[in-house]
Amino acid sequence: MSFTQLRGFGLALAAASILAACGGQSSTSSSTTPTASAPASASSAAPAADGKEYKVAMNAQFPPFESMNSSGQIEGFDVDVMNAIAKEEGFKVTYHQQAWDGIFASLKAGDNDILISGITITDDRKKEMLFSEPYYKITQVVLVPQGKKIVSVEDLKKMDKVGVTIGTTGDLAAQKILGATSEKIIRLENLPLMLKEVETGAVDAVISDSAVVADYVKKKGDKGFTMVEVPDFTVEYYGIAVRQDDKALMDKINSGLKKIQASGEYDKISDKYFAK
Ligand code: ARG
């Protein structure tokens, strides 16, 4: 498995930030759903469409990967990537909001067919579902109010309350450092709740995915939050998931992913959301 494409992101981003600055985010989300549950068909130009329609679930509280806009439309990097794959492979998708806690169970139960939601590929999860090739690389990071010094794991251990989203790899990272039964770990249902807690000072720090925390810090501007990288946190890769027995669908997803990476479509989407 090669991650060269993932490693190349930095350069591609630098080169394309100019483009993004001119293009903005205007009409690009028109291919997403008009409402959270209405069909978002991939373009009619799709080749050899099998006409199949798949339900895609995501916890749309995780910008810039997925979030709900003011008109109830799910948008974000994952939506654009999934739309591009569906278009390449000629199938249709509809997007559905799902609580993070229960997202894997919903796939297993057949309530939906595909999960794309900033999901880290882990060995435990691989026992439960099929994952695509990696499509994004992150690490866990710590978000702290400015002025709070965290440079090591030891500093993190000194915090009284560390917020995580329940059942995420951030939760696992916190357990690894503070202990699985540590009362310092405050588990919340989703990222927006966690951010509120750190803003009010109800928790001292938050552990979550680097790309999401970086996006938040950037949007907050001078509001005084810092993203801290802890050397102990290892690299994670996001994957798209389907049920174990949906091998044919997974083959299509991997094939589409490969095509959009080769064509430059993936980089275009990346620049739209992650240009500096
Ligand atoms: N990458 C982390 C994990 O897989 C967090 C993902 C949370 N995603 C979301 N859409 N809320 O555990």
Image (cartoon, rainbow, N blue to C red):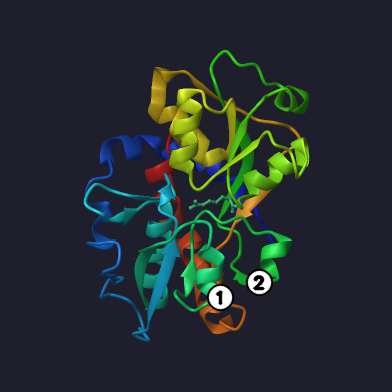
Query: N-terminal of the two: label 1 or label 2?
Result: 1
Question: Along the horizontal axis of the image, is 94 left or right of 128?
Answer: left
Q: Give coordinates of residue 73: x percent, y percent.
A: 27, 56
Q: CA distance from mark 1 to mark 2?
A: 8 Å
Above or below, 167 relative to 146: below
Q: How many marks?
A: 2
In this view, the residue farthest toward the top is: 147
In the current view of this chain or complex, which residue is farthest to the front?
A: 183
Three-letter code for the amino acid on which mark 2 is drawn: Glu
Q: Are marks 1 and 2 in contact (CB under 8 Å)?
A: yes
The crowding category of the residue bearing disc 2, from other C-alpha atoms within 10 Å (few below 14, some 14 to 19, many at least 20), is some
| Numbered disc 2: secondary structure | loop
Residue at image location 35% in from the left, 83% down from the top: 49
Q: Which residue is mark 2?
A: 128
Is 114 on the left-hand or right-hand side of 72?
right
Residue drawn at (43%, 61%) of the image = 98
Give percent across and percent down for residue 242.
55, 73
